Image: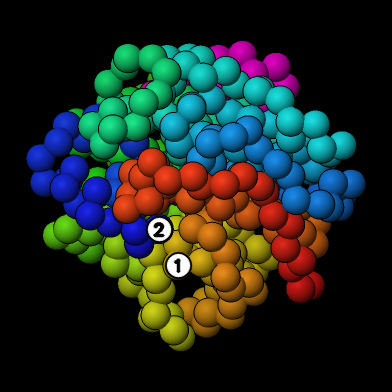
């Protein structure tokens, strides 16, 4: 993902940022809170996605279904437990543009999706709407449920997590905001903000988000790669603390809950297990050598990885053949 940094930085320095999610515009990025692990999925082989679909995020449900957003085509592809691939959410549905973070929430029967206009970085997508939005759909039928605008004209909707009370939390890569959407709410609210969450100069800000076993929220910033804890108590945000990783993070992307730990995607090609103790985070590499990974979701003892290869659509490899796109299963230690 490092390969698209320059594209993103140029965009932040002038182009209309009515657009989407963090992998950054230049780093084209990212994903979010894994659904509760359920029975092991029957599908255990890599899954082939449509050509040049450039996946940006992946989520799952306990029956083994996978949901994948497309950075360029938009919409959401579903992979059934038997391995059938279908267009569950059509490109442009509910006024959506490019799809970044996706999250399937079984409790509420809702599929959340971050929608952004990426035309400013030369990424064609369906529709003509401007701005960054959180879109919601019925998880069973795909029917539109709601559309919620992020408040800043420079906002970039990146990823989503959902709490036990049904509140959704959303990261904004181009502003120092974590938004919340309570059940039955009609608009997003800024739930947490802090200067240390602001995008660095020539960098990309908030990206992945997950709720830890301690009930607090954890977020990443993409460039530079950092990990933060946001204290959550009684539905309100508290102190924001930058955690010290045991090894440097290289393009910190999607986060997912993993028992009492977290799963983390590094755009440099790694899937990590993150264990937080105090203000320190132990980083253990589960899998290295991935090709521009953008997101992960867990089904049983398997982590499913989406490799976005976004440098082939907005980076130095643009116009080159990215090859086939597959979702890769990775064994997760118990």
Judged by its main secondary structure, the magenta piece is: strand
Q: Quadrant of residue 68?
A: top right
Q: Are marks 2 and 1 in contact (CB under 8 Å)?
A: yes
Q: Position of residue 131 (x, y in %)?
A: 28, 26
Q: Position of residue 138 (x, y in %)?
A: 64, 20
Element assignment for label 2: loop
Q: Earlier in the sequence, mark 2 or mark 1?
A: 2
Give left or right: position of 104 versus 265: right
Q: Quadrant of residue 268?
A: bottom left
Q: Which residue lies at the image location 11% right of the left edge and 46% below the top edge?
A: 13
Q: Which residue lies at the image location 33% right of the left edge and 50% below the top edge?
A: 315
Q: Which residue lies at the image location 57% right of the left edge and 70% below the top edge?
A: 289
Q: CA distance from mark 2 to mark 1?
A: 6 Å
- The foreground one among 206 and 241 is 206
Instruction: Give the magenta-colored segment's residue range.
Output: 136-148
Q: Tell me, yes or no, if residue 4 can be seen here.
A: yes
Residue 183 drawn above or below residue 7:
above
Q: Which residue is mark 2?
A: 1
Q: Which residue is mark 1?
A: 268
């Amino acid at each position: 993902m490092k390969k698209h940094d320059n594209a993103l930085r140029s965009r932040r320095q002038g182009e209309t940022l009515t657009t989407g999610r963090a992998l950054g515009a230049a780093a084209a990025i990212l994903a979010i809170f894994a659904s509760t692990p359920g029975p092991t999925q029957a599908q255990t082989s890599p899954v082939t996605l449509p050509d040049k679909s450039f996946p940006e995020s992946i989520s799952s449900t306990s029956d083994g279904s996978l949901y994948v957003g497309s950075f360029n085509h938009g919409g959401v592809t579903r992979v059934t437990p038997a391995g059938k691939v279908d267009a569950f959410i059509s490109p442009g549905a509910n006024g959506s543009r490019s799809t970044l973070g996706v999250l399937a929430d079984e409790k509420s029967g809702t599929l959340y999706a971050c929608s952004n206009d990426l035309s400013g970085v030369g990424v064609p997508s369906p529709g003509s709407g401007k701005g960054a939005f959180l879109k919601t759909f019925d998880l069973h039928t795909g029917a539109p449920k709601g559309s919620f605008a992020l408040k800043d004209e420079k906002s970039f909707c990146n990823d989503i997590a959902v709490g036990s009370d049904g509140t959704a939390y959303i990261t904004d890569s181009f502003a120092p905001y974590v938004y919340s959407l309570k059940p039955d709410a009609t608009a997003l609210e800024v739930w947490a903000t802090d200067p240390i969450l602001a995008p660095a100069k020539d960098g990309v800000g908030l990206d992945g988000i997950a709720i830890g076993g301690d009930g607090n929220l954890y977020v990443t910033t993409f460039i530079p790669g950092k990990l933060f804890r946001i204290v959550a108590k009684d539905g309100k945000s508290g102190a924001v603390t930058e955690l010290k990783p045991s090894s440097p993070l290289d393009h910190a992307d999607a986060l997912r809950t993993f028992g009492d730990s977290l799963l983390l995607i590094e755009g440099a090609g790694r899937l990590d297990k993150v264990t937080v103790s105090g203000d320190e985070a132990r980083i253990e590499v589960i899998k290295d050598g991935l090709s521009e990974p953008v997101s992960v979701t867990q089904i049983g003892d398997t982590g499913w990885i989406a490799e976005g290869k976004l440098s082939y659509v907005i980076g130095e490899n643009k116009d080159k053949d990215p090859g086939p796109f597959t979702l890769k299963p990775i064994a997760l230690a118990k």
